[in-house]
Amino acid sequence: MHMPEYGWPQDAYQEAFTIAAEAHKGQLLPGSDLPYLLHISLVCVEVMAALLNEREHDRDLAVSCALLHDVLEDTKIPRRELKKRFGPDVAKGVQALTKNSSLPRDRRLTDSLRRIRKCPTEVWMVKLADRITNLMPPPPHWDKSKIREYLDEARQIHAALKDASPRLAARLLARIEQYAAYAR
């Protein structure tokens, strides 16, 4: 998609946001009554804030992947649809951000990080932003073991992807430090 030098391609982003809204319609944030679209929006806001200071990145790829990052994982929209509407780079990025549910649970993050690292750093940014927004207070039904596991995953994500964005790496590290209080 062509992006004018003076701004963001709002039409393309509105199309991606609309697809995300349709795809996640009726879904709620785990442990709350808030629409899942809030998570998508927060990830996108994190990415866009980083892009304001880190202008070397492909903004279109980063924002499109941020808006669509959970579409393949959580909905019935096929990858070919993303490829047709947003191009092969966005489809590949969203696919890399999608956990492989056919793998054993303990291998999914390693596999996902391996696939993300094969993509442009804009995709890495989305994963950093995703974990930043997910490090909110844990759901009440999580025990300390689950919280520690999630914290360890966040550290693995930071270690693997921190070079993509100084801003997002620093924000994730700060969130990890705050989240550690829940694991005690």
Image (cartoon, helix red, strand yellow):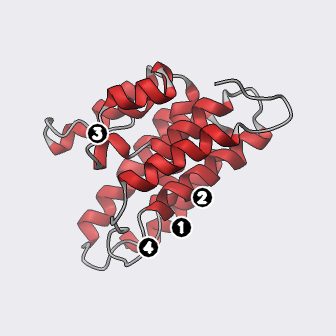
Circle 4 sits on which residue? 137
| Residue type for callout 2 | Ala
Question: Comparing marks 3 and 4, which lies closer to the viewer?
Answer: 3
Q: Provide residue 71's location: percent of width, then percent of height.
A: 37, 44
| Residue type for callout 1 | Gln
| Residue type for callout 3 | Lys
For the residues labelled 4 and 1, the Cα–Cα distance comes to: 10 Å
Describe the element under mark 3 as helix, strand or loop. Answer: loop
| Residue type for callout 4 | Pro
Circle 2 sits on which residue? 174
Describe the element under mark 2 as helix, strand or loop. Answer: helix
Q: Residues within 10 Å of mark 4 (few under 14, many from 20)?
A: few
Q: Given contact means CB atoms under 8 Å apart, are the residues at marks 4 and 2 in contact?
A: no
Q: Earlier in the sequence, mark 3 or mark 2?
A: 3
Question: Comparing marks 4 and 2, which lies closer to the viewer?
Answer: 4
Describe the element under mark 1 as helix, strand or loop. Answer: helix
Label at residue 99: 3
For the residues labelled 3 and 1, the Cα–Cα distance comes to: 26 Å
Residue 53 sits above or below residue 154 on the image: above
Q: Earlier in the sequence, mark 4 or mark 2?
A: 4
The image quadrant that residue 63 belongs to is top right
Label at residue 178: 1
> Position of 139 compared to 21: left or right?
left
Q: Nearer the viewer, residue 139 or 19?
A: 19
